[in-house]
Amino acid sequence: MKQEGLRSQTGYHRRPGHYSSRPAVVAPNHLQRQFTVNEPNKAWVTDITYIRTHEEWLYLAVMLDLLSRQVISWWMQSRIDRELVLNALLMAVWRRQPKHEVLVHSDEGSQFSSYNWQDFLKAHRLVPSMSRRGNCHDNAVAESFFQLLKRERIKRKIYHDREEARRDIFDYIEMFYNPKRRHGSANGLSPVEFEKQYFQRLKSV
């Protein structure tokens, strides 16, 4: 590849000017890379990425359920602030309506270490868990989803504007990834089909 002047597509580099600072609140790493769980709404993982558009950046926050790898919620906006992740978390709680405590794993980013985030978790019986600083492997499932999104849909695109990017990402998540994208961790099924079979098994017991 070097001789031919070719380079691999490995995703985006960290945006210039995105520097870390000491987080306001740090939670223990309760997840400890235990990415296999035996029921839905036991552990959710969340993270943020950004997408290039000619209208500046679009930021995307997602929440995935570890059982099926389903994207249970997402939020997109033009600012990378705590509202971005809080809206994704609110959407997850509204959609899933968990009946017991759920572990919510994130990195130590300022959005996730804010007091607003922590207060919302406590009010909804959600238990915070955080990756060790600078260790992306602690949140590998969320990282893996973003790699799939960028490799299978975004590739080298630069969208005309944020609205075009929103439509395309919505289509990828809700029309392809959740209902159709097969996963080895889900026995070769899509996230939606894997959860469907899980609940069917419960009814037959």
Image (tube, rainbow, N blue to C red):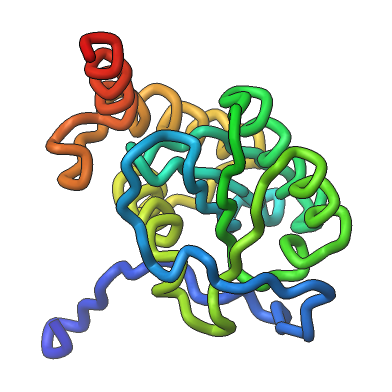
Q: Which x, y percent locates residue 180?
A: 26, 26
Residue at horizontal 71 percent and vertical 83 percent from the top: 20
Which residue is nearer to you in this view: 86 or 97? 97
Name of the residue lying farthest toward the bottom: 3
- The vertical placement of 176 against 68, above or below, is above
Q: Please identify the quadrant where the N terminus is shown.
A: bottom left
Viewed as shown, does residue 29 lie left or right of 204? Answer: right
Residue at horizontal 76 percent and vertical 62 percent from the top: 111
Q: How many marks?
A: 0
Residue at horizontal 65 percent and vertical 39 percent from the top: 75
Image quadrant where residue 144 sits: bottom left
Whether residue 166 appears in this view of the structure is yes
Q: Which x, y percent locates residue 61?
A: 61, 48
Name of the residue lying farthest toward the front: 205
- The vertical placement of 72 against 122, above or below, is above
Name of the residue lying farthest toward the top: 204
Q: Please identify the quadrant where the C terminus is shown.
A: top left
Q: Which x, y percent locates residue 119?
A: 85, 51
Which residue is nearer to you in this view: 157 or 59? 59
